[in-house]
Image: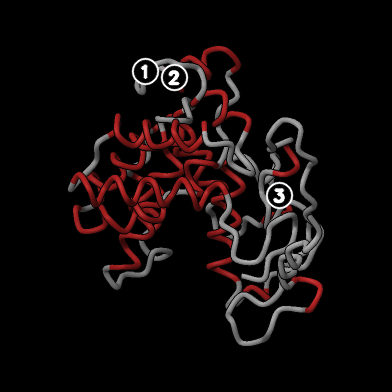
Amino acid sequence: MCGGGGWDAGEATDDTQMAVHVAESLLEHGGLDLPDVFTRFQRWAADDPKDIGLQTRDVLIRGLPWDQAATAHYRAGHRAAGNGSLMRATPSAVYFAAHGRQATMNAARRISALTHGDPAAGEGTAIFHDLVRLALSGADPLGELSQTLAAVHPGHRERYAAILAPDWHPGQATEVNGAVWPCLGSAVWALRTTRSYEDNPYRDRPGWRHRHRRRGHRRPGRRLLRTDRDPGPLDGTAPCPPSRRRRPDPAPSTSA
């Protein structure tokens, strides 16, 4: 990765860092240990990460137990349907893919609930888990989308069915991409209608790449990161532009 948008070349985003913590916990414990995952998130948040979502930060620094913190945040503001738990879900989706639809979707909901108290975030993450499961099994995720939606909680099924419909596109989103619905909908739309990043007509719009910047997703005291920069080639086939290459560290001073 060439960097850009406030990130240095090769630097991992907050979502990637949290995904690694989930993966390490799953491997070290041989399965899902929710208190351990939450503790890893807390240690990461306390280590002054370069970027962290406002909601995630609030949940992790509350000092409440792992099974109460996200619920308390949701009850306080009822605004907890961000896409953070969706963005970090790939390792757990791969890990639970062999366990079948119900198991993988339930695991997604439980991991999501560690930081996102709104069940809508968990349902979106559960859908993603099942789409990954289908892809890894050799099936067509889009062809079996109706079966995935049938396993979604009835109270959330209609809304997800609307944003995952073949005629939906990101221009119809009613929330910014930092919310779970348009984020998942945009990903499925891209899978359905494009073949590469370059094919995506929305790729240069603010909020497409750095989905959380438009919602004040930043660490206190740090300037809001720009979203209007080209991230550079993603497949390693071309060198990073000179302006994106990491500058070498200055030579050590020889003065006393």
Q: Is residue 194 left or right of residue 66?
A: right
Q: Nearer the viewer, mark 3 or mark 1?
A: 1
Q: Which residue is mark 1?
A: 65
Tell me if residue 172 comes above or below residue 120 in the rendering.
Answer: below
Q: Quadrant of the N terminus?
A: bottom right
Residue at (35%, 67%) from the top-left corner?
A: 135
Residue type at the position of mark 1: Pro
Give the Cα separation between the discs numbered 2 and 3: 33 Å
Residue at (36%, 37%) from the top-left corner?
A: 111
Disc marking residue 172: 3
Give the Cα separation between the discs numbered 3 and 1: 39 Å
Image x and y of residue 203, in percent: 72, 65
Which one is earlier in the sequence, the residue at label 3 or at label 1? 1
Disc marking residue 98: none
Is residue 203 among the parts visible in the rendering?
no
Residue type at the position of mark 3: Gln
Tell me if residue 226 comes above or below residue 141 in the rendering.
Answer: above
Q: Residues within 10 Å of mark 1 (few under 14, many from 20)?
A: few
Residue type at the position of mark 2: Ala
Front residue of 19 and 92: 19
Callout 2–callout 1 Cβ contact below 8 Å = yes
Q: Which residue is mark 2?
A: 69
Element under disc 3: helix
Q: Nearer the viewer, mark 2 or mark 3?
A: 2
